[in-house]
Image (cartoon, rainbow, N blue to C red):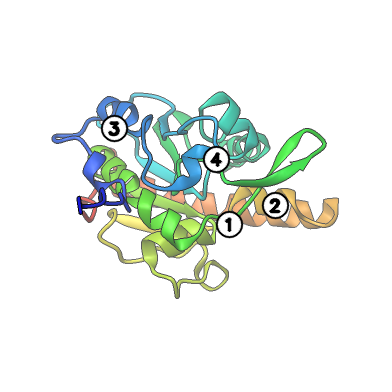
Amino acid sequence: MPKRPSVQTTAAPLIPESPTYDKLRDAAAGCRACPLWETATRTVFGEPVGRPHGGPRVMLVGEQPGDQEDREGRPFVGPSGRLLDEALEAAGIDRSQVYVTNTVKHFKWKGEEGGRRLHAKPTTTEIRACLPWLAAELRVFRPDVLVCLGATAAQALLGKDFRVTRQRGEPVDSDWARIVVATVHPSSILRAPDPEARERQLDAFIDDLRAVARLIHGLGASGEGAHASP
């Protein structure tokens, strides 16, 4: 009996040798490492907003693209992205020094409401399948500061026992980057029950990003990020 073809369980075999951003983005466009590609419109890869000398100082990592990101093929262009832009500006972080990406590169959804597809949380298997892309992005850009936005990104990179509620805004020792910080995902602020709660949560989020801005300033203009883990 002929052997059944092996099942590809992670994106690791798809990572190009001597990867560059363009090589990674092109390779990820055809990723089939987990079933999410079947219902998503396209791969939504990370995006450097600017091309400053030496690469972005900060990498922001969320959970996965949302409905609008999936349609446009760009990360953080929906409501969460607009709130993130507002918070970055308030915190004094130059958007041109930021790279934005997600732990999972395809949109996972579970039905529609009002013409908008509803987000579904990715599984551990789906996160594990996609993690080689994120590891490769970190190797290419070597940011000074890595910011995990929300529990999915934080636990994918810092371990399943990590709790954003306990350690938000605090620098964490990690091989992924020179400095790693976790905070909430902007989408959690948008889900606040009332305007007052939203304002309080946004202020706390901006405070976390101000701490990141101080860390960048403390590293100096010539600081080099650490190599990411394989």
Is 82 left, or right, of 16 in this rendering? right
User: Which quadrant would residue 67 be assigned to in this image?
Assistant: top right
- Asked which secondary structure carries label 2, the reply is helix
The residue carrying pointer 1 sits among few (fewer than 14), some (14 to 19) or many (20 or more) residues within 10 Å by Cα, namely many
Which comes before the other along the chain, label 3 or label 4?
A: 3
Residue 127 placement: quadrant? bottom left
The location of residue 126, given as percent across then percent down, is 44, 54
Q: Position of residue 56 (x, y in %)?
A: 34, 35
The secondary structure type at the circle numbered 1 is loop
- Three-letter code, disc 2: Ile
Task: Judge depth for marks 2 and 4 and give the one in front.
Answer: 4
What residue is at 44 percent from the left and 40 percent from the top?
A: 101
Residue 184 got which mark?
1
Q: Where residue 137 sits in the image (x, y, percent)?
A: 30, 41
The correct choice, above or below, for 156 with respect to 120 in the image is: below
Quadrant containing the N terminus is: bottom left
Dots 2, 4 in contact, CB < 8 A: no
Which sits earlier in the primary sequence, circle 2 or circle 1? Answer: 1
Residue type beneath disc 4: Pro
Per the image, the residue denoted by label 2 is 189
Q: Does 224 sit above or below residue 204?
A: above
Tags 1 and 4 touching, CB below 8 Å:
no
Q: For the point 64% across and 57% down, which residue is it?
A: 204
Under circle 4, the secondary element is: loop
